[in-house]
Image: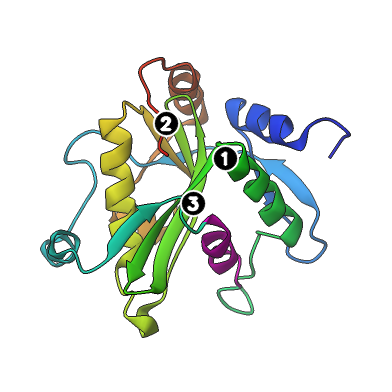
Amino acid sequence: MSSQDPVEIVLNAYRDGAFPMADPESGEIEFFSSDPRCIVPLEIGALKVSKSLNRVYRSGKFKIEFNTAFARVIAACAQDRTDENRTWISSDLAKLYTLLHERGHAHSVEAWLGDALVGGLYGVAIGGAFFGESMFSRPLEGGRDASKVCLITLVNRLRARGFQLLDCQYANPHMLSLGAVEISANEYMQRLAAAVEAKGAQALG
């Protein structure tokens, strides 16, 4: 990255439809975009919540908080999934997101079971757009469905605060099963332009 403010570099990249990822081998941070682009529609009913997941969500099993353990959430998200599926969240990228959080741009949603952090997600908010970055859960510690409950909570919060866009970048079977859809890059950029300039959206914190 250049000598410019790294926070502004990243925010401008998001505004332009790009997002940062670090190479698992070198740790070098680069910016990417995708076509098609994956989003989670914020219309009521668009998120696919099974009956069993809805029961967990409504049961209050997990205590859900916003922005109380950002560093712990990003550290959990940064762990390698498998030897083949290594993390794209390098230590430098984690520090960058932490700086974004400290300046009020990056947010975490946490699921707690007692005093244990058993799931969560984080992302970046600009105007009425939220760029979801990563999520995790710890089923062996009682956190089965914890990240999904965080996502439901996030979608409800975004909708209530007037957000227009929930971006999740690349499609994967997990997100598609929850109601995420793919749209063309052209359509995404049109939605993005309107969302980042949204005047009615309120802060998540």
Say which mark, if any, is on residue 34: 1
| Disc 2 versus disc 3: nearer the observer | 2
Upstream in sequence: badge 1 or badge 3: 1
Upstream in sequence: badge 1 or badge 2: 1
Residue 145 seen in this snapshot = yes
Kindly state the secondary structure of the residue where label 2 is placed: loop
On-image quarter of the N terminus: top right
Residue 190 position (above or below residue 41): above
Q: Is residue 74 magenta?
A: yes
Left or right of 204: which side holds 62?
left
Upstream in sequence: badge 2 or badge 3: 3
Q: Amino acid at mark 1?
A: Ser
Q: Residue at x 49, y 38 (%)?
A: 36
On-image quarter of the C terminus: top left
Residue designated by label 3 = 122
Q: Residue at x 38, y 74 (%)?
A: 115
Q: Which residues are magenta?
A: 70-79
x and y, in percent, of residue 150 in the image: 33, 56
The quadrant in which residue 89 appears is: bottom right
Q: Residues within 10 Å of mark 3 (few under 14, many from 20)?
A: many
Kindly state the secondary structure of the residue where label 1 is placed: loop
Q: Tell me the distance, in whole angstroms, between the alpha carbons under discs 2 and 3.
A: 15 Å
| Disc 1 versus disc 3: nearer the observer | 3
Residue 170 seen in this snapshot = no
x and y, in percent, of residue 40 in the image: 35, 42
